[in-house]
Image (tube, coloured by chain):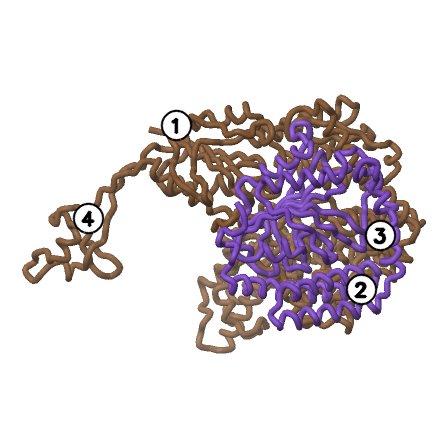
Chain colours: A purple, B brown
Amino acid sequence: MNLQELIFRLGHFWSAAGCLAVQPYDIEMGAGTMSPHTFLRALGPEPWNAAYVQPSRRPADGRYGENPNRLFSYYQYQVIMKPSPDDIIDKYLASLQEIGIDPLAHDIRFVEDNWESPTLGAWGTGWEVWLDGMEITQFTYFQQVGGVDARPVSAEITFGVERLAMYLQGVDSVYDLEWARGIKYGDLFHQNEYQQSKYHFEVSDAALLFKLFDQYESEAKRVLEAGLVLPAFDWVLKCSHSFNQLDARGAIGVTERASYILRVRNLARACAAAYIANRESLGYPLLQGGVHS
Amino acid sequence: MNKKLLFEIGVEELPARFIPGAMRHMAERGEQLLSAARLRPQSVEVSATPRRLVLSATVSAMQPDQQKEVKGPPVKAAYDAQGAFTRAALGFARGQGVSAESLYRAPYEGGEYVFAKVEERGRSALEVLAEVLPELLLSFSFPKAMRWASYDIKWARPIRWIVALLGDQVINFEVAGIQADRQTYGLRFLHPDPISVPDASQHERLLSEAHVILNHEERYRTIKQLVQEAAAQRGGHVDENDEALFREVTDINEYPSVVVGGFDPEYLKLPVEVIITPMRLHQKYFPVYQTDGSLLPLFITIRNGLADEQGNVRVGNEKVLAARLADAAFFYEEDRKIKLVDRLPRLETLVFQEKLGTMRCKAERLQRLAPAICRVLGGSAQECATAERAALLSKSDLVTNMVFEFTELQGVMGGHYAISDGEDPAVAKAISEQYRPNSSGGALPETVAGRALALADKIDSLTGYFGIGSIPSGSQDPFALRRAALGVIAIIKEAGVRVALTPLIKQAYDLYGGDVQFKNDRSTTCSLLDEFFRGRMRSALTEDGYRYDLVDAVLAGGELDPFDFHTRIAALDRVSGTEDFLTALAVFNRAGNLASKATTDSFDRGALPEEADQQLVAAYENARQKVTEALHRGGNGNGNGNSNGDGDASTSNVTTAIQALAGLREAVDYFFDTVLVMVPDEKIRRSRLALLRSIVALFDNLWDWSKIVI
């Protein structure tokens, strides 16, 4: 099964399971959880079921295209269901069968792993799911998001698309993955991995990035004060990404690190509070059953 | 009549670390609640798998009837002036369903009231259990609890089904949207459909048919046997004492099958810890050893399900391990390119604790503290120099790739890298021992320099955290300071040398220097740590099985010296039943009553008029000489000058001292029988009190006798 087929199959499955097939968010971020489709929608009483591919970028994980497993940029397949359905694990296992993993022919484990994001002021309980000893999924019941107790609780399922595809295709290097017939992952992205690694480790301008971080932060605050939480959150994402860029460049000392994380967290918390107030003022439109079955 | 009770809480996969505590709780609290509900529980048994907690018991089908006494109105309000029942009394009797004539009077809390004897019919167990079982379910507390969906309950993981049967009947209740029923589930993938349990007694059998070994001990034994047989078939063995791993694997499987995989023998060139750490801690594999203790290029893992006929599980796990070992080999290669000593500048960017500075500063403090401790331990000049060098390099492995990836290997990797840097093997050994003991009862450092460094590391942390006011309380101990203190105690006990901790804490405090803003000053920090250490000593000694009053007696005074505490408690424990001891205790009690009234302990022998006075003075002086000789003749002989009295409280010395104290008996009795202490003449009175106080002071050399309960 090539990689794009894997994405299609997951999309069909989760769509049939009641999820909206929303599209990737268009601002750079480190993980699908940071997308407004998850971070903001997980807040408040409104139901929300969605699944999407989220291109994710982690500057510090770049390896110049030389490491078979580590990437600057990669894809997450993200499922979020609120409230968490009672049969969510059965759904998840059925999705594995859908992409050709027969649980009877493999060893599937739920190993305790409680997710936590200091930058988002968020944490949850759950597992990493192992397939014959290899982690293929992160499974989380959100307990807090942006410092706010999650009620009702969402279930979040994050598949590492490349990891899963490597397993299914039996290849040892991500660059050997078949994206579509005749086209390899390396053909598409190797140069990007090399150039982005080179840029983030050697070429990026730390002084500029520090300036951008400050500007993004003040713009987020200004926009929040103007009562516009959605554009404000975009600036928070920008802020978070420039922090990651600075981190990759080794420009932030260990002691300063905590204070930068705290600055992003404060913004994320402010957005969470503003988003909840905003939805309340709108009368929680999705509570009216308007979304879908 | 008795019936079998079965209560199963079906959950999504529980964290393995929660299971032992949850089983204990279910058994204890379950038995308590069933007894309190008068259901006379017998053979209460608890089992668990990752997906279920199960309690079974035999209980009475009915509560027994019981007679209750119910308090009514006060007598004054129950009878009118003619002595007839008032309306209040009649109403009370009617309300309790008894005749007014059967009311009786009885005192209650200073007043007199009328009472009714009421027969309460026992309720059926089915009805009572519908209240007891939800209460039991809600009484669990977990290290980390969670909510799910929209339910108002917090539990370890979402609850998905409940089986509650009394014999063949369902006990009716609902929790978190789940109706208790008779439907259970077998092994996840093989048996996705519910299984109906017709009767409580068939639950375990039906589960075993559905590929779940419910019994915890049976699963544990099965796993142990499977793993040992698999190792033996390949000419090796596993570490059968690796209880932590066997227990954890028991708690992550419902139906164990064994899978054996291999790895490239090339990796056997790596240090053994580098190979087995990812295996054990990350992948839960059992490493396989040869008779000479070296590793075979194999691993054993337990699969949750049937045998791996197609080999998928083996191949998948082999790939995962190969990737991890490839990483480890790469790190090992890379890390050795930079010497530990050349990594010191990098430690400036690694924070030990925000307020307490960097790891570089910590290494420099240890460089001073470790050799000082080494001297106290009686180390040679050579050993002290080893401790100093090891201390300087002790934190450098924290900035290696390997330790960044496998934190558990801190210290151990430092030892390997020190060898590869060409350091003295003794230095390498001390570095590798610095974090011991890793767990309660874990291996201790074996060398003097290793002990010195391990003690220095812990004393430095304890002093720093207490200095900034970060002190463990209740369940809050984020920096594992309790474990650090217990480690200090264990190392000193093992070393068998007197070590007064307070001077070392003072030194550690001063070494932090002016850069650190402490919240507590030095003497406050010392007294907080004194109390903290005595608290840890109390748990360590109580756990060793010593009587609590003896432990309290020993800990009430004396220098903060774990070795001395251990010697004194051992001695006290041995002598506490002897006749001399009881005699000495009687002397202490007799003298002690009045001694507390003394204002001084210097008495004027010439001021004491009676023969009994003089006899007691003579007996006191004789006893004092013997006690002093007994307790101060020993000493540990290293002459380190660390403790102010280098006395030795070994059992034989203590026995001698106690004989001397018991010898006071006759003179003390004669004294109290013939003279009056509290005479009007102030000079005589004061001298007699001072004499008694001096006698009590002799006892104080040993422990606080007033804490001892006979």
Q: Which residue is mark 4?
A: B96
Q: Are marks 2 and 1 in contact (CB under 8 Å)?
A: no
Q: Are marks 3 and 2 on the same chain?
A: no
**What is the number of callouts on the image?**
4
> Picture quarter containing residue B504?
bottom right
Q: Which residue is mark 1?
A: B168
Q: Are marks 2 and 1 on the same chain?
A: no
Q: Nearer the viewer, residue B662 or A105?
A: A105
Residue B280, placed above or below residue B258: below
Point out which mark residue A167 bears: none
Q: Amino acid at mark 3?
A: Thr
Q: Judge depth for marks 3 and 2 and give the one in front.
A: 2
Q: Which residue is mark 3?
A: B400
Res B649 visible: no
Q: Secondary structure at mark 1?
A: loop
Q: Judge depth for marks 1 and 4 and give the one in front.
A: 1
Q: Judge depth for marks 2 and 1 and give the one in front.
A: 2
Q: Which mark is first along the chain, 4 or 1?
A: 4
Label 1, label 4: how many angstroms apart (C-alpha)? Answer: 36 Å
**Mark 1 falls within which chain?**
B
Q: Nearer the viewer, residue A46 or B160?
A: A46
Q: Are marks 1 and 4 in contact (CB under 8 Å)?
A: no
